[in-house]
Image (cartoon, rainbow, N blue to C red):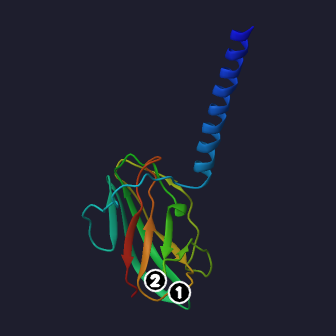
Amino acid sequence: MERGRLLRYAGIGAAAIVVVAVGTAAFISMQGQFQLPTAAPTSSPCSPAPCASVRGFTLWVSDVKVDAGLVTMQLTFRNSSASTHADPADLQLVDAQDRVSSAVVRAPTCSAWARTEFNNGQQLGPVSECFQPASTSPPLTLRWSPDFGLFCCQLEIPLEAA
């Protein structure tokens, strides 16, 4: 009887550990892209600037404009990487005070574009992207987090408005 009770408690303890591990993984996945602390990712050489390239996935930014609190730009992607898509959710604008803004769709120049599956050197764009940050004072930075799985990248692309 004593051995049976001990095994039952061990089984309950193991089940509790599994439940906590699954709950922790679910919580982390709901918080967004989890990244281990590593050296800051760097962009491979690309041109014309502003651009960023990581593992064969390149993003070019063009026609950056600031008008009446709205920052607009054109984005072009080329994907020769293990990543499978481009997604507007992977982009944020960071203002001079490090405040982060997500894309907005307002005005005729700000059209929505959907997550797009592509690879093998295919190109997407140019697509319009618009942000309405708290401040449009320079410097403005486009933060790109391409999806390479659980542990990867967050690249910063410095912008200059025309």
- Marks counted in the figure total 2
- In 3D space, how far apart are the residues under numbered discs 2 and 1 (Cα atoms)? 7 Å
Residue at position x 51%, y 59% from top?
Answer: 87
Q: Please, what secondary structure does the residue beneath circle 1 have?
A: loop
Q: Position of residue 138 (x, y in %)?
A: 42, 87
Q: Amino acid at mark 1?
A: Ser
Query: Are the residues at dot 2 and dot 1 in contact (C-beta closer than 8 Å)?
Result: yes
The residue furthest top is 1
Is 141 or 70 nearer to us in this picture? 141
The residue furthest front is 2
Q: Quadrant of the C terminus?
A: bottom left
Q: Position of residue 119 (x, y in %)?
A: 40, 49
Residue at position x 49%, y 80% from top?
Answer: 72
Q: Please, what secondary structure does the residue beneath circle 2 have?
A: loop
Kindly indicate the quadrant of the structure image that contains residue 76: bottom left
Q: Is residue 125 left or right of residue 40?
A: right
Name the residue tied to disc 2. Answer: 96
| Disc nearer the start of the sequence (2/1) | 2
Q: Position of residue 33 (x, y in %)?
A: 52, 54
Kindly indicate the quadrant of the structure image that contains residue 155: bottom left
Q: Amino acid at mark 2?
A: Ala
Q: Is residue 108 left or right of residue 80?
A: right
Q: Position of residue 15 (x, y in %)?
A: 67, 27
Residue at position x 40%, y 86% from top?
Answer: 161
